[in-house]
Image (cartoon, rainbow, N blue to C red):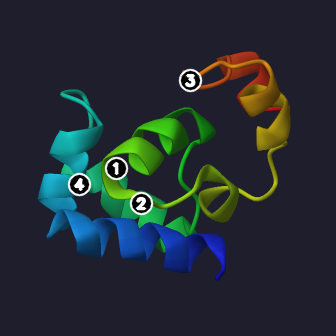
Amino acid sequence: MNPKEALERAIETAGSQTAFAAAIGPDIKTGHVYHWLKSGRLPIEHCPIVEAAFGVPCEQLRPDFRWELVRQAGQPAAPSAAAAHG
């Protein structure tokens, strides 16, 4: 499964792009979700939230990030913004 398909699965589980946006956080708008779908790329900092809420693993959403390092450190939160863009 590629990252876009993983994101589509999470959105489908949420029921709609609007419900998906609301589940991620109050500052997330449907337009953000549309953009992520179009680009096929969910920002790294949102992956742990999506995994917890919809069961789609971070490794499927963003296979370009070394999630094993975050998991080994026992950090349930998203990586820092600096690490996310590296």
What whole-number distance in Å separates the C-alpha atoms at marks 2 and 1?
5 Å
Identified at 65% across, 18% down, the residue is 75
**Amino acid found under the numbered disc labelled 3:** Pro
Disc number lying in front (4 or 1):
4
Q: Residue at x 67, y 23 (%)?
A: 79
Q: Earlier in the sequence, mark 1 or mark 3?
A: 1
Residue 6 image point, x, y percent = 52, 72
Estimate the spatial distance between the alpha carbons at disc 4 and disc 1, rounded to whole Å. Answer: 10 Å
User: Are the residues tagged 2 and 3 within 8 Å (C-beta)?
Assistant: no
The label on residue 35 is 2
Cβ atoms under marks 2 and 1 closer than 8 Å:
yes
In which image quadrant can residue 43 be found?
Answer: top right
Specify which label sits upstream in the sequence, 2 or 3. Answer: 2
Q: Reading the chain from its start, which is encountered first: label 4 or label 1?
A: 4
Which residue does the numbered mark 1 point to in the structure image?
Answer: 32
Give the left or right position of residue 60, taking residue 36 as reference: right
Crowd tier of the residue under label 2, counting other residues whose Cα lies within 10 Å: few below 14, some 14–19, many 20 or above: few
Tags 4 and 3 in contact by the CB under 8 Å rule?
no
How crowded is the residue under tag 4: few (<14 C-alpha within 10 Å), some, or many (20+)?
many
Q: Position of residue 45 (x, y in %)?
A: 55, 32
Q: Residue 76 got which mark?
A: 3
Report which residue position mark 4 lands on: 20
Q: Residue at x 21, y 42 (%)?
A: 23
Give above or below for 22 relative to 75.
below
Quarter of the image where the N terminus is located: bottom right
At label 4, the amino acid type is Phe
